[in-house]
Amino acid sequence: MNQIAVIGAGTMGNGIAHVFAMNGYQVTLIDISADALERALVTIDKNLNRMVSKDLLTESEATDTKSRIATELTIEEGVKTADLVVEAATENLDLKLSLFRTIDEHAPAKAILASNTSSISITHIASATSRPEQVIGMHFMNPVPVMKLVEVIRGYSTSDEVTASIMELSKKIGKVPVEVNDYPGFVANRILLPMINEAIHTLHEGVAGVEEIDTVMKLGMAHPMGPLQLADFIGLDVCLAILDVLHKGFGQPKYAACPLLVNMVKAGKRGRKSGEGFYTYTKGSKDLVVSSSFT
């Protein structure tokens, strides 16, 4: 396995491309937006330079990494020689089903098709293809170049051979793979998102403020980042989408998204990527400032 295609040039996609290329794989990064691809290459360059400055990588290794990344605007061209396709598009079921139909039609018959989905059923995604035994989940954590975990999710039909191959590949790129079965939210987000949702309820009910809630969890529970800051980092729209998957999948009220989260997403406050969530984000500043909505 040498040729990797990554679909989606956003935060997760460019991180996945970075990691595969850094570990010697030829990568084609695919997005329908030329601007998104250009931004992705700029981000990868910045992240590689940061690694060089920290002596984690040599300048020669960084240059070689960049040389292994090509870009493509169409799935048809981007996946035609791939051994592995990793989809890292928006967390939307209909979009993913459409993408996997197209990937299945144009990728080589031997290719493994993986989704970086954080909550959507791999079994459902695989149903859009003619090769469900070759469809699997590879849920990377953000930021991909830093975080070690990969949740490897087996769909109902995923073969033992494909699972073993992806487990081994994950180790080769310096990750720690954990095999899990295909249920809503898998392991990571089934546990994480209800905690984040409860933190939002705690704010919504006036129990404590944004900084107070995050401080309790950082200092009291040794979390590196408070749940509200983490929600901003993930993206409030993504948090809402995952909670909706959990609520629909399990049918239990405890997974229903807090009304405050719903309203914030409707208002366009999606967290760090939109400039405001529970905190406000100013370009170039590392200081956390609580959003004026909560002060």
Image (cartoon, grey):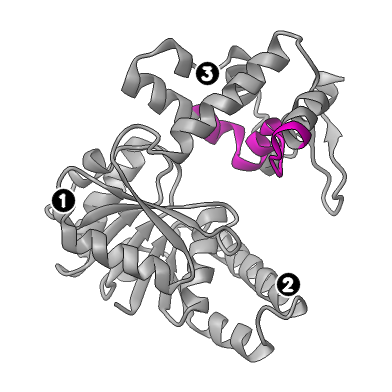
Q: Nearer the viewer, residue 236 or 229?
A: 229
Position of residue 266 in the picture relative to residue 71 (left or right): right
Q: Which residue is mark 1?
A: 132
Q: Amino acid at mark 3?
A: Ala
Give how far apart the Cα atoms at labels 2 and 1 are.
39 Å
Position of residue 142 in the picture relative to residue 124 (left or right): right
Q: Which residues are magenta?
A: 219-240
- Residue 260 screen position, x and y as percent: 64, 16
Q: Amino acid at mark 1?
A: Pro
Q: Amino acid at mark 2?
A: Arg
Question: Would you say residue 165 is visible in this rendering?
Answer: yes
Q: Which residue is mark 2?
A: 50
Q: Quadrant of residue 203?
A: top right
- Residue 274 screen position, x and y as percent: 69, 39
Relative to residue 178, is residue 121 depicted above or below?
Answer: above
Secondary structure of the residue carrying numbered label 1: helix
Query: Exactly how many numbered labels are in the figure?
Result: 3
Q: Nearer the viewer, residue 72 or 143?
A: 143
Q: Check disc 2: other Cα within 10 Å, few if <14, some if 14-19, many if 20+.
A: few
Q: Check disc 1: other Cα within 10 Å, few if <14, some if 14-19, many if 20+.
A: many
Question: Would you say residue 76 is visible in this rendering?
Answer: no
| Residue 257 numbered mark, or none | 3
Secondary structure of the residue carrying numbered label 3: loop
